[in-house]
Image (cartoon, helix red, strand yellow):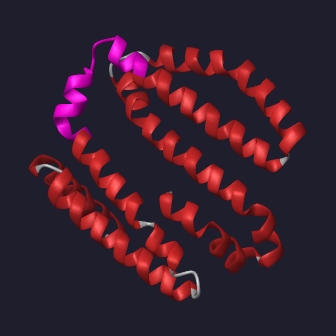
Amino acid sequence: MLLTVILAHELLHAWLGSDFASHGTLVLQILAIGMLVYSLGLIPFSLLQGIGRPDLTAKFLLLELPFYVAGLWFLVKHLGLVGAAIAFALRAAVDALLLFGAAIWLETVSIRSFLDNGLRRSVGAIILFAAALPAVWLARGSVSAQLIVALILTTLFGLGAWSYVLDGRDRSLLLTTAIQFRNAILRP
């Protein structure tokens, strides 16, 4: 998603042309940030579902609905599509905060366990990746140069996350899942 934020204009230009890119870049960037936050919220969402508390996720959505609709109406009226993207990103942020808060409040996960089980390393890796992303932007002269820099940075991030962020159990689970996925696809 961070790469999408950096390459939004180029992606839209290649896909839908320069006119759409000039009007849609900010919308795509805001939506990408919203999706990043939304994807983080899936962690406590899944945890709450798994411990038998789907009622909380439903209650949060019902609680958010009137605020989201009112905010969406106001922001679209004043900012158009950018306002719709902002409304989505804000709703994703509020939802993620509520879900993480519920997971901690129910004492299913403590803040300490998040910190002890790789959150610091994960955040550190993401910060390093984000700090390196301006290199993609600096290669603006050529889309191919930007894609090459983005591919190199993403590969380095993946290797760094593999060795520094994931523990042996996580790596084993990912390898097993990848093998099962490959076998399911290749099965006649």
At which x and y percent is residue 103? 36, 20
Q: Nearer the viewer, residue 57 or 73?
A: 73
Location of residue 21 (image quadrant): bottom right
Is residue 188 among the parts visible in the rendering? no
Question: Which quadrant, please, contains the C terminus?
Answer: bottom left
Classify 170 as above or below 56.
below
Q: Could you tell me residue 74's position as x and y percent?
A: 84, 31
Instruction: Examine the image and state in which quarter residue 51 appears.
Output: top left
Q: Dominant secondary structure of the magenta stretch?
A: helix
Q: Position of residue 82 (x, y in %)?
A: 77, 48
- Left-right relation of 96 to 187: right
> Range of the magenta residues?
101-119
Is residue 166 or residue 141 the one in the foreground?
141
Above/below status of 183 relative to 53: below
- Residue at x 36%, y 12% (from the top left corner): 105
Q: Is residue 104 magenta?
A: yes
The residue lying at 72 percent from left, 27 percent from top is 68
Question: In the displayed structure, does residue 175 sit left or right of residue 10?
Answer: left
Residue 178 rendering spot, x and y as whole percentages: 26, 62
**Magenta highlight on residue 185:** no
Q: Is residue 163 visible?
A: yes
Q: Residue at x 42, y 79 (%)?
A: 149
